[in-house]
Amino acid sequence: YIDRVSPGWPARSEGLHKSDRNTARRSLQAHNRRFIRRSGQKLKRAVAVLASVIVLGTILLLGSVATEQREASEERAWNDVDNLAGAFQEQVGRVVDSVRGAIALLKPQLLAEGAAFNLVDWTRHVPEFATSTVQIAYVGPDGKLLATSLSRNPQPVDLSDREHIRVQLTGEHKGLFIGKPVIGRVSGQPTIQVTDRIVNADGKLAGVIVFSLSPEFLTTLHQVVNLRKTG
């Protein structure tokens, strides 16, 4: 048997072992490459998912912060509105109280002197009304102008059709009446009319006293209030 074995068999056998090792090595290398490729793909997907989570979390966080800031800004704005409204109400209240006090002083004098009472001189002695009041007028029971702080000898302009005069002439309103903004028929300026009745001792109407207020004066508060960019 030994005689029949080819002399080159050990060499061929060794060559086969080398070939098997090379094949195994290549197979292992291919497997490693596939493993690395699959691992790389998984890593990429994991990184992409993580990045998406981070981005989404950042967006949600920024949205939450923006919402909180907006709500805080809105709350500050409403506080400013409330404070400003209160300040306007206080300013208008002071003006109306001043007019009510002045009417209380003028009523007995107008009742005693009538059209002869000099409203021009009286206004000069009461400078606090210079900025808030366009004119002070006295209207007779027939609705015609008798006296005004704008002129010593006014024309008898008929004002009986004006609401602020009519409600006092007819007696449908008792006490101080604040009319709608109108263009004054005597002054020619935009005014807010405040009127009240003047009655004799027997209760008959003697006339109507009129304070024509400047709307600009009643709305000057916003010029000294800092509303900021959000206001």
Image (spheres, rainbow, N blue to C red):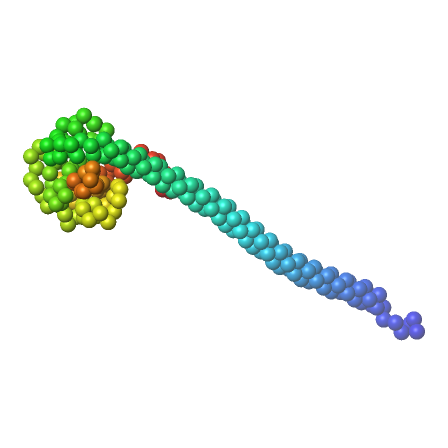
* 51, 82: nearer the viewer: 82
Place of residue 108 in the rendered image (x, y in percent of width and height, measured from the top left): 20, 32
The N terminus sits in image quarter: bottom right
Residue 209 appears anywhere in the view: no
Q: Is residue 223 left or right of residue 121?
A: right
In the orientation shown, which residue stands out farthest toward the right?
Answer: 1
Whether residue 119 is situated above or below residue 173 in the rendered picture: above
Q: Residue at x 13, y 41 (%)?
A: 140
Place of residue 2 in the rendered image (x, y in percent of width and height, measured from the top left): 92, 71
**How many numbered marks have been drawn onto this rendered protein structure?**
0
Place of residue 117 in the rendered image (x, y in percent of width and height, measured from the top left): 13, 31
Place of residue 163 in the rendered image (x, y in percent of width and height, measured from the top left): 19, 48
Whether residue 92 is situated above or below residue 44 in the rendered picture: above
Q: Quadrant of residue 76?
A: top left
Q: Quadrant of residue 122?
A: top left
In the orientation shown, which residue stands out farthest toward the top?
Answer: 125
Q: Residue at x 32, y 37 (%)?
A: 93
Whether residue 143 is situated above or below residue 113 in the rendered picture: below
Q: Is residue 23 left or right of residue 193?
A: right
* 175, 157: nearer the viewer: 175
Q: Residue at x 88, y 72 (%)?
A: 5
Residue 57 appears anywhere in the view: yes
Q: Residue at x 38, y 42 (%)?
A: 81
The C terminus sits in image quarter: top left
Whether residue 112 is situated above or below residue 231 in the rendered picture: above
* 47, 6: nearer the viewer: 47
